[in-house]
Amino acid sequence: MIHTETVLEARDIHFSYGENTVLKGVTLAVQKGDYLGIVGPNGAGKTTLLKIMLGLMAPSQGTIAWFGNDIHQFKDWPKIGYVPQKATNFDGHFPATVYEVALMGRYGRRGLFHLTTSDDKNQAQKALEHVGMWELKDRLISDLSGGQQQRVFIARALAIEPEIIFLDEPTVGIDQQAKNDFYALLRKLNHELGKTLVLISHDIEMVTREVDHIACVDRELVCYSTPEEFLKNTRFTGVHEGEVQVIVHGHQH
Ligand code: ADP
């Protein structure tokens, strides 16, 4: 018998920024070991949904449960890793080395002001080895390419030893080869390390190739399916720089 464990359950999530209703009754579950892609047009509410799932914002209606516990009771946040959008969250001149950035992942576990333990160092090293960046550990993060920086951010998330990792548009601004390498790394984290992954992206071409399930969010949950079903039932209009701009759902006329 296949035993599944629900890692995350979002039920009937509603959210508005003032008059602007961004989420209307989104219900979504993530199972252990799953690799879920959340796709949808810009402004569809994907990042808002992610922030609500992570407890950074409260929904106006609906509930979130983590590992079977309501988010208000949930305490085990180190089980959850988060790789935010690079462009909006990272200062390119940040004067830290690759190793220091990976170590920062450990601070989240026990608060910022603590001494680095040998366990912290081991986990930071292991995380950098997993993403193939240990050799560059003494380089300044600002001297790396966008693709390399993203690998270091993955290492920072991995260093807390999470069970699930959220990634928000992780390949924006990196070239195609680096993107391919990046998706190969995510595949390894999912298949070999058993990490549950939730990837927000509007790069539908890549996502349909990589993930186990796709959730389309456009204020509502428009679809939830395997990539195969998704491709069968979805029509695209307008492709710009390899990224599908608009998703049109439903039957062909
Ligand atoms: P996506 O991640 O799918 O691009 P977002 O969740 O970022 O969508 O945004 C959904 C909608 O909410 C957009 O219309 C956006 O302009 C609006 N929005 C996002 N953040 C804020 C905010 N802090 N204040 C007001 N409106 C916001």
Image (cartoon, rainbow, N blue to C red):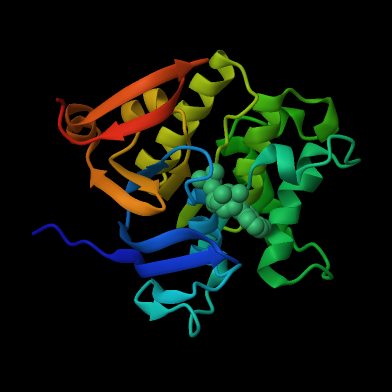
Which sits in the foreground, 202 or 110? Answer: 202
Q: Is residue 208 left or right of residue 146?
A: left
Number of labelled discs?
0
State which quadrant residue 176 falls in.
top right
Quarter of the image that includes the N terminus: bottom left
Q: Position of residue 242 (x, y in %)?
A: 47, 16
Quarter of the image that includes the C terminus: top left
**Residue 138 shows in this picture:** no
State which quadrant residue 231 falls in.
top left
Give the residue displayed 57% in from the left and 30% down from the top.
171
Q: Position of residue 202 (x, y in %)?
A: 47, 33
Give the residue displayed 58% in from the left and 20% down from the top.
178
Give the residue displayed 66% in from the left and 67% down from the top.
109
**Residue 84 shows in this picture:** yes
Give the residue displayed 64% in from the left and 42% down from the top.
85
Q: Is residue 37 left or right of residue 180?
A: left
State which quadrant residue 137 falls in.
top right
Which sits in the foreground, 48 or 228? Answer: 48
Q: Is residue 49 left or right of residue 67?
A: right
